[in-house]
Structures are given as structure tokens and as C-alpha cells.
Amino acid sequence: MCGNIVIMKRVVVIGGGPAGMMAACRAAECGARVTLLEKMNKLGLKLSLTGKGRCNITNTEPQIMTFIEKYGDNGKFLINAFNTFFNKELMEFLKRRGLVLKELSGGRIYPDSDNSWNVVDVFADYLKELRVHIELESPVKELLHYQNIIGGVVHENGTVLCDAVIVATGGNSYSKTGSSGDGYQLARVTGHKVTAIYPGLVPFNLLDIDPRLNGLKLKNIKATVTVDEEVLSEAFGEFYFTEWGADGSVILRLSRDVKEEIQEDYLTLHIDLKPALDEQKVHERILREINSNGKISYRNMLKEMLPEKMISYFITRTQIPEDTKIANITKEQRETIVKNLKDLTFTITGTRSFDEAIVTSGGVELSHIDPKTMESKKIKNLYFAGEVLNIDGDTGGYNLQAAFSTGYVAGENAAKEKENNEEN
């Protein structure tokens, strides 16, 4: 139930991504006459790319406050939205409309088909069923407002007068899908502060990366980022080298924590290849190998400790001849081996661009938005939802859940008759 509904209240939603489509659906469910404006020629283009085309829809973590922790300091803004529409409600919403879901490790929820377009299709079909008017290739140029009350929008193909507007334009990542920061300008010209924005959940560029490492994937490693020996962040998970640097879940998580520092200076990336063993245990393992197989070469010993693709690079890094009999390895050389197994370092020169970032970190200042309704505190009947807001989460389905939840709340409240228009 929506309560206090104005029959055929006119709502315009700007942006056909996850937040925008959900907002349009909920506003229409609540009795509003909805127009959805999308600048690209299809709905859900960015959604179609999420999870490498598989779409990690949400996460099954049942506790809202544990879920909230995945968004850092700004996570508390989402408490009301999640209490209104959370992962269980989202999964039921999709399943009721025929989408079969599956759960993978870490509570990650995907469509069973591993095809993100199936998620987009659910929304497209439901929007049609709800008779939402969709205008594609219609980028918005201006918000019409008078005396701090919204009145409509001007877009590429005309003007739409309305009772409420929901800005769900996304952030600045994957700009080719239409998510190119348009919402920030709409926010600024209506008096909202937009924080500094950074690529979020984004790979690192590394200095002088050795081409032999390109494509090497490492599982269950620990990675740490430091500046001047100060630890900025650390994470465990999957890591892989690329032709330009480092990627993988562990790197994406680190990138959220060092987004500001990485703009200012070169940072150091430390990789612990044996996080389950402390340095003493690694020393003991090498000594056992020397005592039992002293005649084998250094290269052959490394075959028991490292992926094949990494061995030649590791030999170069430690500067120990590959044909050295391990019985002849000195104490100093053992220490070098252990040091590189436990603390293999690289220089981070920056991140990849916004076009390779999964999300945008930063956005519309949250203190300007009512977390109970997603309505602006500056302009009546203007709402914001999704990635355009200054909130971003970890990998694992958290960012899409935030988009769907804030979109749902914005849509519901945009369709409501306000009980008291004196306050906002």
C-alpha cells in the first residue's frame, strides 16, 4: 500500500538504469502517471554490464546493519530505504515476474541464466504493463522549478510538466552507457552540493609492470596499500595482473579506501602470497624442502610454492640463479625468498579511468536529501536515487541493492500526496 495517493499524479523519472526503472515501477504502482526519460537508445545499458554481464543483483546478508557496513561512513543513510525495500523484497519482486535466481559464494545473487539482460527485460516488461511512458534518446537539459518547487523538465525532444521529478541518472562510470555525470549538473543548478567524485571499485595502474605477469590470477592472497609506511587499507581475495597493472576483487575493494590518496601521490601495493603462514612458518617450509630435497634446483622448488606463470618473474625478482641447488641457498637468499613471498611490492601510479570503474565514489551531498523519502531538502518534489548520490558500496551486490532500494523509496514518495507542504 502507498497511502495518500493523488490519482494520476504526474511523475518524471530521469534515467533508465536500476534506480530509475525501479522508481518508475513503484511510482506507477502507487497510481502516478509516469514518464521515464532515458538518454540512450535502450533501457538498462549499464545494468547489462554489471557482474561482467551476469548481474550481481544483491546479496543475501540478512542483517541490515551488517549490510550497511559495506558502504562505509555514509551507509547509515540507507537504513530507512533498506527497512522499506531490502534484498528479500527485491528477490521476491523479480521472482514474481518470472526471473529465476541463484545464490553463489558470499551470498551473491545472480539470474540463473547468468544473463543480465534478463533482469533488464523484467523491468522493461513490467514498465510496459504499468503503462509507463518511456522516451528514449531524450537527454534532459533543464529542471523547471519556481520558488523552490519543481514543475517539470526540458529534454532533447520537448518539455514535460509534472508534479515530481526523480533524478536517477547514475554516476560518472561507464559513460558509454549514458552514465556520464549529467545528474551532478542538474543537482548543482538546483542548489545541491556535489562532492568530489572518484572512480570507485576500479583497477590500479602499476609502475613498470613485467609483461610476464600479464593474465596471472592469484587466489586467497592478502593485499595492502601503504603510503610512507602508513597502512591505508588491506583486503583478502582474488587478484590478477593485467598488461597495465592489477585487478580482481581484492583490488576493487582496496580502491574504495584509497580513492583520495591515490589522486595525490604514488602508493605502494604489498602482496602476501602466503597469508595463511607467518614468516617463520615460510622459513620452516623452505628449510624442510632443503633438508629433504637439497639436490633439486631453485626453479623446481618454486614449482611447489608458486603458479607456473609466476616462477620466472619471481626468480628475476629474488636475483637467485634458477639452477642453484637449494642446498646451496644461503641464509640471506632464504630471507629474500621469504620477503618476496610475504611482501611482494609494486608502485601504484593511479587508477584506471571512470570508464573502467564499476561505480562512482562521491556525488550529491547526502545532507541535502531526506533519507526517509529521497526528496531534496532544497527543492520540493525533487527526488534523487541511485548512484548519483554520494554513497557507494563494496562488490558483492551491494551497489545494485542501494540503487533499487533508493529508487523504490523515491518512486513511492514521489507518487504520494504530501500531508504537509509547509515543511520538507
Image: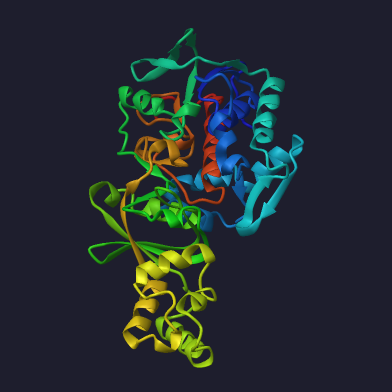
Residue shown at the point (39%, 40%) measured from the top left: 390
**Of 357 and 97, which appears nearest the observer?**
357
Q: Position of residue 410 (x, y in %)?
A: 52, 32
Instruction: From the top left corner, tell me how far across and down residue 249 is, in percent.
Output: 50, 54
Q: Residue furthest front?
A: 323
Q: Is residue 411 visible?
A: no
The answer to whether residue 30 is left or right of residue 394 is right
Residue 376: percent from left, percent from top: 40, 30
Residue projecting furthest to the bottom: 291
In the rendered structure, the answer to whether residue 198 lies left or right of residue 358 reads left
- Residue 4 placement (x, y as % from top left): 59, 27
Taking the image as shown, residue 190 lies to the left or right of residue 213, namely left
Vertical position of residue 388 compared to residue 16: above or below: below
What residue appears at the point 40 percent right and 37 percent down from the top-left corner?
354
Color encoding of the figure: rainbow
The quarter of the picture where the C terminus appears is top left
Give the residue at the far top of this rendering.
Answer: 158
Q: Nearer the viewer, residue 381 or 404?
A: 404
Q: In this rendered view, identify the residue nearer to me: 249 or 372.
A: 249
Q: Nearer the viewer, residue 404 or 289?
A: 289
Q: Is residue 138 visible?
A: yes
Vertical side of 36 occupied by 309: above or below: below
User: Height in image: 22 above or below 137?
Assistant: below
| Number of numbered labels in the structure image | 0
Taking the spot 52% from the left edge, 76% from the top edge, the residue there is: 300
| Quadrant position of residue 318 | bottom left
The answer to whether 220 is drawn above or below residue 338 in the figure is above
Q: Quadrant of the N terminus?
A: top right
